[in-house]
């Protein structure tokens, strides 16, 4: 069990209702007798409890080669991001890009902007401090030294959502707010240094080239053993306390931001001040005034955004692109629209309450997931998935193995998933999905246990070992 101090010092990792309707039958599958060995023996040896469901099929024909509990609805965790990728690419197109703009409602004359300056967001989940700094640099290059009007911010690209999943601890950085103005994946860097008179605490929005301080999120050290953090929401501000006994000497940690619009607006104003332009206090508007664009920064294309999302499992990216694709007013409504799209596009029944898989309330079957992947094998998705690599009997990854495994992982407390493609150098390619969940054990956790649940690391390790054994088994038997 790791100490509280280790938990605090570590940078944050990018990490129940009735199940889905059963999927249409793909094809007859071989019967599996209890104790017959092979895949079922691998599952029993893992000793995970709860339910394990899997299916492996021929990628070309969709013929099911081996399956177990394949029609049991399971929480997909971050495997849901593969479906979100398919959905966003279909609705928005692979070349879609987000734009963050600075606009003016009046002319610029002799270094004076005669009107309002407006920071305009479209929901870009990849905007970081360095890109925002470059935007400020572009604006400064126009010679603007004064603004006669107001400093406005518009964040109407996607709706504001306080947090992705309300069942997560307040302080985990993988559960931030979502908004039309996002910055640094809506996380702020909390830094502490111990000196002779106690601790010096600070908050900043650090990038690689710019490290502006932040005041809208603040923290105070309190003499207590627990809880590790407390959070209080203010008007456009985040107030944190931390248990001083857990701080140690020096360290830093990313904390989530609940007011990303205010965060982005403050950091932009700080960066502009460094260029000699002092902006007035920001005002947020819900309707965008008419004006001209003075400067703009654009995200990478959607294919690149989703590839990074699948590699690093960034929840904010998943929710932002899903909300952009649906145009819905809330996260559950947006998840329901993706659910309807999956039914229409792939003929599957499932339940999505978000786009990242962070909530444990979503459900999809292994048969449905593998079926959607098999039908998408000729599109962009396989090339966007991360290569996982095959492992030998000891669990060690085999370098330069000719068989490639392209897949998305997913992990929640006592939930683990893996779905994707097994591609040998020649012969039969396979599509698979594996979902494991002990929802009873997961639901029994207190809020204080959810960041580091007792037994959670070992359960996840066992689930991943089982997945590796299944993939090696299938690669040897069917390719």
Image (cartoon, helix red, strand yellow):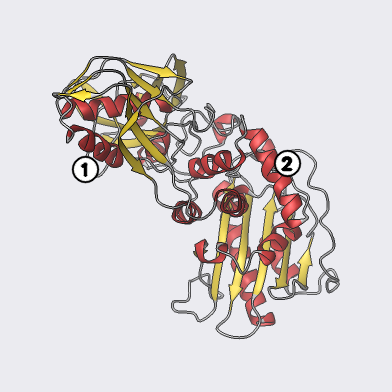
Q: In the drawing, does residue 63 fall left or right of residue 317?
A: right
Farthest residue to the bottom: give it: 426
Q: Nearer the viewer, residue 313 or 25?
A: 25
**Mark 2 closeness class: few <14, some 14–19, many ≥20 residues within 10 Å:** few
Residue 96's x, y, as percent?
48, 49
Check residue 464 in the rendering and tell me which mark sits there, or answer none.
none
Q: In the drawing, does residue 371 fall left or right of residue 243?
A: right
Residue 445's x, y, as percent?
63, 35
**In which quadrant will I find the C terminus?**
bottom right
- Residue 197 in which image quadrant: top left
**Mark 1 closeness class: few <14, some 14–19, many ≥20 residues within 10 Å:** few
Does the image show residue 50? no
Residue 369's x, y, as percent?
70, 58
Pointer 2 or 1: first along the chain: 1
Q: Mark 1 points at which residue?
A: 209
Residue 350's x, y, as percent?
75, 47
Rendered view: 300 above or below 282: below
Q: Nearer the viewer, residue 168 or 37?
A: 168
Rendered view: 19 above or below 307: above
Mark 2, secondary structure of its residue = helix
- Residue 270 in which image quadrant: top left
Mark 1, secondary structure of its residue = loop
Rendered residue at 29%/21% (across/down): 106
Rendered residue at 46%/24% (across/down): 226
Q: Mark 2 points at which residue?
A: 440
């Amino acid at each position: 069990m790791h100490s509280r101090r280790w938990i605090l010092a570590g940078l944050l990792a990018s990490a129940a209702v009735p199940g889905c309707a059963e999927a249409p039958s793909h094809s007859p599958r071989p019967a599996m007798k209890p104790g017959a060995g092979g895949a079922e023996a691998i599952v029993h040896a893992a000793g995970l409890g709860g339910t394990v469901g899997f299916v492996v099929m021929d990628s070309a024909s969709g013929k099911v080669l081996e399956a177990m509990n394949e029609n049991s609805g399971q929480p997909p965790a971050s495997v849901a991001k593969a479906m979100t990728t398919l959905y966003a690419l279909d609705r928005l197109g692979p070349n879609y890009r987000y734009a963050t703009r600075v606009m003016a409602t009046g002319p610029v004359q002799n270094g004076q902007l005669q009107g309002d300056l407006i920071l305009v967001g479209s929901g870009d989940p990849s905007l970081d401090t360095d890109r925002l700094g470059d935007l400020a640099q572009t604006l400064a290059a126009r010679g603007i030294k004064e603004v006669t009007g107001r400093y406005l911010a518009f964040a109407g690209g996607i709706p504001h959502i306080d947090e992705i999943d309300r069942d997560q601890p307040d302080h985990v950085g993988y559960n931030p707010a979502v908004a039309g103005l996002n910055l640094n994946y809506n996380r702020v860097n909390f830094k502490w240094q111990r000196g002779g008179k106690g601790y010096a605490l600070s908050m900043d929005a650090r990038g690689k080239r710019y490290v502006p301080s932040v005041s809208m999120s603040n923290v105070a050290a309190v003499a207590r053993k627990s809880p590790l953090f407390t959070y209080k929401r203010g008007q456009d501000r985040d107030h944190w306390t931390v248990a001083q006994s857990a701080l140690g000497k020096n360290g830093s940690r990313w904390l989530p931001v609940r007011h990303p619009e205010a965060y982005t607006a403050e950091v932009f104003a700080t960066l502009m001040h460094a260029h000699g332009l002092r902006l007035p206090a920001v005002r947020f508007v819900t309707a965008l005034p008419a004006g001209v664009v003075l400067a703009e920064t654009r995200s990478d294309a959607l294919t690149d955004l989703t590839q990074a999302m699948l590699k690093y499992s960034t929840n904010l990216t998943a929710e932002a692109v899903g909300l952009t694709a649906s145009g819905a007013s809330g996260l559950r409504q947006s998840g329901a629209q993706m659910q309807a799209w999956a039914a229409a596009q792939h003929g599957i029944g499932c339940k999505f309450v978000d786009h990242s898989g962070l909530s444990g309330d979503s459900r999809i079957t292994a048969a449905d997931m593998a079926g959607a992947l098999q039908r998408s094998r000729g599109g962009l998705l396989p090339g966007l998935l991360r290569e996982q690599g095959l492992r030998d009997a000891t669990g060690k990854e085999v370098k330069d193995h000719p068989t490639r495994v392209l897949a998305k992982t997913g992990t929640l407390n006592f939930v683990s998933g893996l779905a994707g493609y097994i591609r040998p150098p020649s012969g039969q390619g396979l599509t698979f999905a594996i979902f494991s969940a002990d929802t009873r054990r997961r639901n029994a956790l207190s809020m204080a246990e959810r960041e580091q649940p007792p037994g959670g690391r070992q359960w996840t390790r066992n689930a991943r070992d089982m997945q590796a054994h299944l993939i090696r088994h299938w690669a040897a038997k069917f390719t």
